[in-house]
Image (cartoon, helix red, strand yellow):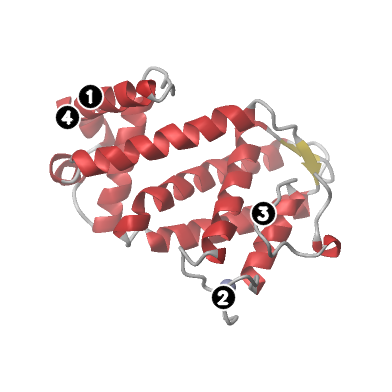
Amino acid sequence: MSVAGIRNSAKVRELATELRDRCALADVHLVAGEAEEIVVKHVQAIAAQLGLAERTVLTRYMGEAAMDSLVTVVASSNAVHVEAASTAAPVVIGAADVGAVVAALGMSLKLAAQELEHEVQFADALGVTTDAADAIVGLGAALRGAPDRDKIAIGGPSLVYARKVLWLTIDHLRDRTWACSCRDRHEVGKSCSLQKMLARDLGLIGGWPSGPSEPAAGERGPSA
Ligand SMILES: [Zn+2]
């Protein structure tokens, strides 16, 4: 089934209308075509994950519970996005640091993808994978278009998504909602080496993890 095929189906239009209406109730207003896009991407992600045809996912897996979690993710991520994107000042960093942030986003994407298998984590993990992908695209574009390799400006939604993804990943590793892939022994209240690395990379783009186990000031990247 081609992408155009499911996009133009009555079922996608029906789900998109439901998504748009329910998000509007949460005061999140999706622009024309956006709800359809979100539904199609969501179906494609589930289809890829489960190894099923998109049409099958669309007809059998997009029930009430699936729509509930989709509405929750879209409404909350959009609220964060709208609020933060309007206030986030761009950061200017070197190409090597952009590379470190892209690598950290890739690691977050990998960890989130593993969590897609767990039903309770699914909606949240899918949100992180989508945001990480958007951030990587944005950072790649900033890197490609920068005339000066030492001064690459990262701002707008790319910056917001990158910070959000790293922040959530560190948070989920810290409270053990997500499984960590590093070899350290994991103890509550202590950052493992992967968490520290992600926190340092988050610092590079002016973000800061929450919680009690922040690295010492000396481990921080450039200040926000
Ligand atoms: Zn770890």
In this figure, which residue is indicated by the disc labeled 2? 182
Would residue 176 appear left or right of 21 to someone viewing this image? Answer: right
Residue 8 can be seen in this image: no
Per the model, the C-alpha gap separating discs 2 and 1 is 43 Å
Q: Ligand 1 closer than 8 Å to the CB at disc 3?
A: no
Q: Is mark 4 within 8 Å of ligand 1?
A: no
Label 2 close to label 3 by CB (< 8 Å): no
Residue at the spot of label 4: 11
Picture quarter with the N terminus: top left
The x and y percentages for residue 66 are 25, 43
Question: Residue at horizontal 25%, vertical 29%?
Answer: 7
Q: Residues within 10 Å of mark 3 (few under 14, many from 20)?
A: many
On residue 13, the disc is 1
- Amino acid type assigned to the residue bearing label 1 in the image: Arg
Q: Position of residue 49 (x, y in %)?
A: 30, 56
Disc 3 marks a residue whose amino acid type is: Pro
3D distance between C-alphas at marks 2 and 3: 19 Å
Q: Kindly report the distance in space between the C-alpha atoms of the residues bearing marks 1 and 3.
A: 39 Å
Q: Are the residues flagged by discs 2 and 1 in contact, CB closer than 8 Å?
A: no
Q: Earlier in the sequence, mark 2 or mark 4?
A: 4
- Secondary structure of the residue carrying tag 2 is loop
